[in-house]
Image (spheres, rainbow, N blue to C red):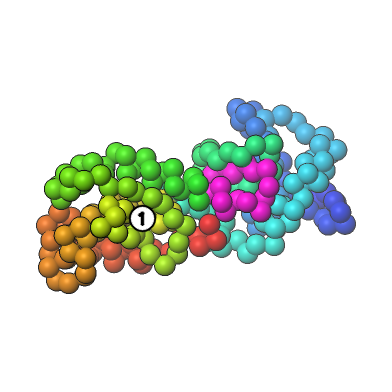
Amino acid sequence: MITVEVNHIKFNVEVVYKRYNRRIYLRVKDKILYITTPTKLSSFSIEDMIRRNFNTIVKLMNTTPKIEDQIHILGNSYRLEIKTASKNRIHIEEDALIVEITHPHKVGQLIVSFYNTILKNIVESYAKEILNQFHISKDIHFSYKNVKGYFGECFSKQGKIILASKLAKYEKKYILSVIYHECAHFKYQNHQKEFYDYLESFFPNYKKTQKELRSIKYNEVY
């Protein structure tokens, strides 16, 4: 481990060499900056890298290493690594979700867009079959919204279902349970007993699944 001083702040740095990696990645854990690199780095290169990513690194250093250090995609846990780059990109490598971003303050927007893409793929794979089960013949428009107060919402008269972006964090069974719930609203608008009886005829153990869903605590920063 080495100590590097940039802008009057001392950073403890651990350089990890992985020759099969294609890129250099930065992550912070327990107040230590880890630099994973496929090639040897000079002291000048390390200092320059910290300088170029200074604001992001300081922000990560000051974040208490709790649940905020993790991010979940379809129920799987990943380390969240944020890196300043020339273009925006998100990808998974080993046990990390790498967020490459041109403007660090827009990380949240990029992650929400990533969540929405995941949900769109699931809707494209399953919605037609689910709608057929409910005998819903008209075209239904699915949209995605970054909200915290609910997982889904149905506007039956408009033929519209909204899914919360955050659903992409959870296992697929929980996402499908929400889609089934909203489809059931095309027959029953309110949550009376008949609604749940009807819903459970298509999605057995729905209430148990929902209880599990609401008990799961994930990163609420993103």
The kind of secondary structure element at disc 1 is strand
* In this picture, residue 196 sits left or right of residue 145: left
Vertically, is 201 above or below 26?
below
Q: State the image coordinates of residue 117 (x, y, percent, origin top left).
A: 44, 43
Vertically, is 171 above or below 94?
below
Q: At x 46% / y 52%, what residue is drawn?
A: 72
Which residue is identified by label 1? 162
Q: State the image coordinates of residue 1 (x, y, percent, origin top left).
A: 75, 47
Q: Nearer the viewer, residue 120 or 3?
A: 120
* In this picture, residue 12 sits left or right of residue 140: right
Q: What span is colored magenta in the figure?
A: 97-111
Q: State the image coordinates of residue 118 (x, y, percent, origin top left).
A: 41, 43
Q: Give the quarter of the image for residue 86.
A: top right
Looking at the picture, which amino acid does disc 1 mark?
Ile
Q: Nearer the viewer, residue 67 or 85?
A: 85
Q: State the image coordinates of residue 94 (x, y, percent, origin top left).
A: 51, 39
Q: Residue furthest right?
A: 8
Task: Answer whether residue 42 is visible to the viewer in this image.
Answer: yes
Q: Residue 28 magenta-drawn? A: no
How many numbered discs sit on the rendered protein? Answer: 1
Q: Give the quarter of the image for residue 210.
A: bottom left
Q: At x 38% / y 64%, what residue is drawn?
A: 150
